[in-house]
Image: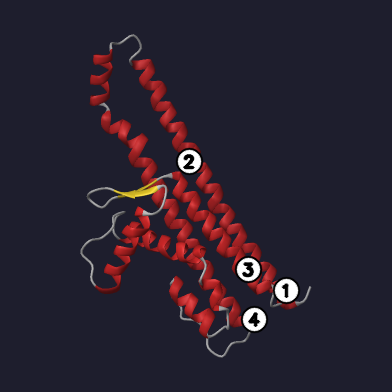
Amino acid sequence: MNKKKLSYYIFKSLSEHRLDEIVESLDLIESGLKNKFQDWGEWYEKKTKGWSDAEKSDFIDHYYDDLAMVRDTAPNMARQAICVCISGYFETFMADLCRYVYKTKLLPSGPRQKLYLEDSQNYLIDKAGFCEQLFDSQEWKFCIKASYVRNAIAHYNGRVPNHLQGNLKKQAEIITQFINNTEGVSVTTIGDILIDIDYCKLVMKHIKKMTEIFLEAIESDL
């Protein structure tokens, strides 16, 4: 195996390994959440065995905050966190891809130290000669919009911000429209982003597809 192919193999293996780790983490988190909710249900059934419906209702009212935590709050926080990880992985992958191409193709100018997805796109097209059609797919556009949702979760406490100006305000508008048109994610009346497991899997599906597309693009050029 020549040096160029070895470099590609290492880059590909590391990228796929990191993505597999996130998939495994998602499965572990969902399994833990399901078990926790099941444990709460078993505890509830044991505590209220033989009680009337009215007594059970009073019990639920008393422990509603605990129920809401295991049923709603904790799952949403965990899924928000995994979505941040998934989109963060892809942003890092694209930045690493720019650096990989710069080194292996001996390009005259390297990428900036900090690269967002749009920055990586511009570098790969303008400096590395990647085909623009790679960035015209629905998968790429989905990944861009999912990264905006990730930014809202990471930087605005899990809410769609409503006080921004300029490009950031435009991002917030895109987030709202994207969420309205996407299964498994929604926004409350006060702007909180609610995430279901289906949305996590959907983001993973698109990012995995784009990762494969870019890896294939590199391999075809070896």
User: What numbered label is drawn on residue 5?
Assistant: 1
Residue 116 rendering spot, x and y as whole percentages: 43, 72
Helix, strand or loop status at disc 1 = helix
x 69%, y 77%: residue: 221
Q: CA distance from mark 2 to mark 1?
A: 38 Å
From the image, tell me which residue sits under label 4. Answer: 104
Left or right placement of residue 194 versus residue 200 in this view: left
Report the amino acid beneath label 4: Thr
Q: Which residue is mark 3?
A: 215
Q: Earlier in the sequence, mark 1 or mark 3?
A: 1
- The answer to which of marks 4 and 3 sits earlier in the sequence is 4
Whether residue 4 is situated above or below residue 50 in the rendered picture: below
Secondary-structure class at tag 3: helix
Residue 200 pos. (x, y %): 46, 50
User: Dot 2 corresponds to which residue?
Assistant: 30
Q: Earlier in the sequence, mark 2 or mark 1?
A: 1
Decide: is 2 above or below 23: below
